[in-house]
Amino acid sequence: MEPDIYSKLHTEGYLSDASFEKIRQKQSNHLFSVHWELKTLLSLGVMLLSGGLGILVYKNIDTIGHQVILAFIALICIGCFTYCFKNKLPFSRAKVKAPNTGFDYILLLGSISMVTFIGYLQYQYTVFGLNYGLATFIPMLFLFYIAYYFDHLGILSMAIAALALWMGISITPKTLLAYGTFNSRDIILTYVLFGAMLLAAAYLTKRFDIKKHFKFSYHHYGVHVTFIALLAGYFEFYNEALSVLWIVILLALAAYILWDAYQEKSFYFILLAILYSYFALACLLTRMLFATMREDSIYFLFMCFIGSAIGLIFLLININKNLKRDDHLQ
C-alpha cells in the first residue's frame, strides 16, 4: 500500500494515531539489503588474499623456503576444507543452498589453495615427472568432486577450465611446453570434442536430474567452445572440398541449441545460436560472391550485410518480446 493510502485511512478514522505513527516511522526507516555488497566484499577478500599471498611468496622466496610455503598453503587448504566439511548441509541431487554467507568463499579459497599447492609441488619438485597431463588431471577430478559435493557453481567453472587444460596438454605436451605451439588441426578437433562433451554433460545433467542448475554452466561453455571450434575448423580446412561440412555441422548444432533454448525460454542461447549461424552463413555468402569475381559483388555484399543486420535486429527484438509475453501468460 502507498503512504497516501495510510494517510487517507487515518483521516477517515480507520487508523488510530498510534498505529499511523508506527507505520510512518517504519516507512521512514526502510531496511535495505546488503547481500550483494557483502558477496562482493567476500569475493574481493578471497582474491586479495590469494594475490597477496602470491606476492609475499614471490618477494620472499629465497628467505622463506619452499617447504615453509608449501606447508602454509597446505594449512590454508586443510583449514578451509575442515570448516566446509563440518558445516555443509547434506548432499542432494537438487540445488543445496550454502549454510551461511561465507561458506562458498571459504570453499573457494580452499579450492584455489589446493590447486596452487599441487601446481607448486609439480613446478618445484616435479612429483609427477614429465607427465603434465596427470598434474592437471588430478586437480580436475578434485574440482569436479568439490563442485558436486558442495554444490558450487564457481568451482564447477574451475573444473571445466581444468578439463580444457588437461585435454589440451594431453594432445601434445612436449610441443606445448617446448615450443608453445599446437598442431592447429589437432587442437581444433580436440576442442570440438571438448565442446561436445560439455553439451552432452548439460543434456545429461537435466535428463537424469543431477544438479540441474549446473546445466547453464556446461551449456554456456559448450556452446561457445563448439561453435568457435567449428568456425576455426572451417577456416583451417578452407581450401579443401569438405570445408563446407564444418558449416553444415555448425548449422545443425545451432538448430538444436535454438530448439533447446525455446524449450527453456532462454533468450541468451537463442541469441548465441542466431549470431553464430549468421556469422557462418555470412562467411559462406562472402566466399561464393568472391568466387564469382564480379565487380559488383562487393556492393551486393555490403547491401546484404546491411539489410540482414537490420532484419536480424528486428528478429531478435521480436523473439524477446514473444518470450516475455509467454512468461506473462504462464
Image (cartoon, rainbow, N blue to C red):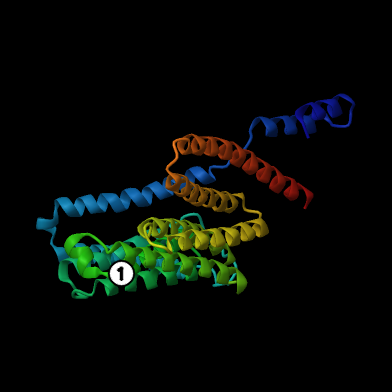
* Viewer can see residue 32: no
> Which corner quadrant holds the N terminus?
top right
> Residue 326: x, y in percent?
74, 49
Q: Residue furthest top?
A: 11
Tell me the quarter of the picture where residue 170 sits: bottom left
59 over 299 or under it: above or below: below
Image mark count: 1
**Secondary element at image label 1:** helix
Asked whether, in this view, residue 229 is left or right of residue 121, the answer is right
Q: Which residue matches tag 1?
A: 136
311 over 75 or under it: above or below: above
Pointer 1: residues within 10 angstroms few (<14), some, or many (20+)?
A: many
Asked whether, in this view, residue 242 is left or right of residue 75, the answer is right
* Viewer can see residue 117: yes
Q: Foreground residue, 135 or 171?
A: 171
Asked whether, in this view, residue 12 is left or right of residue 138, the answer is right
> What residue is drawn where x is 61% and y is 72%?
207
> What residue is drawn where x is 51% and y is 63%?
249
> Residue 117: x, y in percent?
26, 66
Q: Foreground residue, 321 or 78?
A: 321
> What residue is drawn where x is 35% and y is 50%?
47
Tell me the quarter of the picture where residue 40 sits: top left
> Residue 257: x, y in percent?
58, 59
> What residue is drawn where x is 44% and y is 72%?
145
